[in-house]
Amino acid sequence: MAREKGYAPLPEPLVVPIYDNHTHLDPGPAHESQFDAMPDYREQLENAARVGVIGVVQVGGDIESSIWSAAHAAREPRMLAAVAIHPNEAPRYEAAGRLDEALAVIAELATQPRVRAIGETGLDFFRTDAPGHAAQFRSFEAHIEIAKANDLALQIHDRDAHDAVIETLLRVGAPERTVFHCFSGDAAMAKICAEHGWYLSYSGTVTFKNSDALREALSITPRELILIETDAPFLAPTPHRGRPNAPYLMPVTLRFMADHLDTPAAELAAQLTTNTELVYGSWDAWPVTAE
């Protein structure tokens, strides 16, 4: 796995195990183009298990990665799946006349027992210009309805679109379990989310030097609404920023968060594990299929 400026060494194992509630282990071109060849997902899960990360939610962002996520979760006991059309993909499908087809695929995948979330979906006004926003809104609202129809969690991608995401959730009606993946808001937004019982998932970005506003948000987030993720292979935590991320680096972020909250790492890990299982259910609730 190791190469110069490549994957970081394994951190000290956690005493209390945790889950990575948002990761990308599929060997898609968007992932490998930035980090060369990614290790096989089984190797990544083995490394994660060695440090106390006992399960992941594998997240899709288009038809292919969503199918991959559902299929591999069906036979991998350490993996659950989230499926969706990423907001930056929605305008591309729309332009090709395939958005309805893509949404139908997501709706079908949502019925599988180890698919536990619809995501990542939402709005991204950073990478998608105004002409593509209508497709994003249509896709986001359709994903919300799929999540509610199947009693699944919703994983939200929100980049430079805080107000529009919140307005959409309030107008359409948020699913019972709504998660702001890689939360990027401030304390004021965290307060709004908490008032509605929405979960905030913190990633390695909370460790970045310039993330004071994010740490302020963490400080006021009710403990029962905090989740944790890697968003691997992106957003490796300090001191590994710039390297490829992986689920086994979760302990680095967890310990940073615990120090910031002046809480023992084991206590915070126990809380986050409980929170994660309340959102997604048990990793053991349904048997996996044979290879």
Image (cartoon, grey):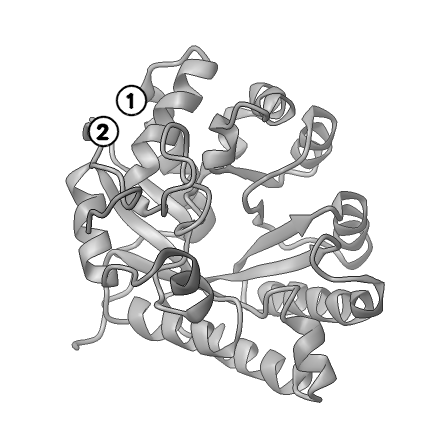
Residue 249 in percent (x, y) is at: 31, 38
Q: Which residue is identified by label 1?
A: 266
On the image, which quarter does residue 148 sit in?
A: bottom right
Q: Residue at x 30, y 31 (%)?
A: 251
Q: Residue at x 18, y 56 (%)?
A: 43
Residue 111 shows up from this direction: no
User: Are the two marked residues, 2 and 1, in contact with CB atoms closer than 8 angstroms?
Assistant: yes
Up the image or down, 183 lies above or below 81; here it is: above
Label 1 residue SS: helix
Q: Left or right of 121: which side holds 238? A: left
Q: Which of 40 and 136 is in front in this view?
A: 40
Q: Which of 104 and 247 is in front in this view?
A: 247
Q: Left or right of 117: which side holds 147? A: right
On the image, which quarter does residue 29 sit in?
A: bottom left
Up the image or down, 68 lies above or below 152; here it is: below
Up the image or down, 283 lies above or below 211; here it is: below
Residue 5 shows up from this direction: yes
Q: Which residue lies furthest to the top in this view?
A: 262
Up the image or down, 49 lies above or below 264; here it is: below
Q: Which of 134 and 111 is in front in this view?
A: 134
Q: Residue at x 38, y 63 (%)?
A: 32
Residue 84 in percent (x, y) is at: 55, 68
Q: Which residue is identified by label 2?
A: 14
Viewer-nearest of discs 2 and 1: 2
Label 2 residue SS: loop
Residue 126 in percent (x, y) is at: 72, 52
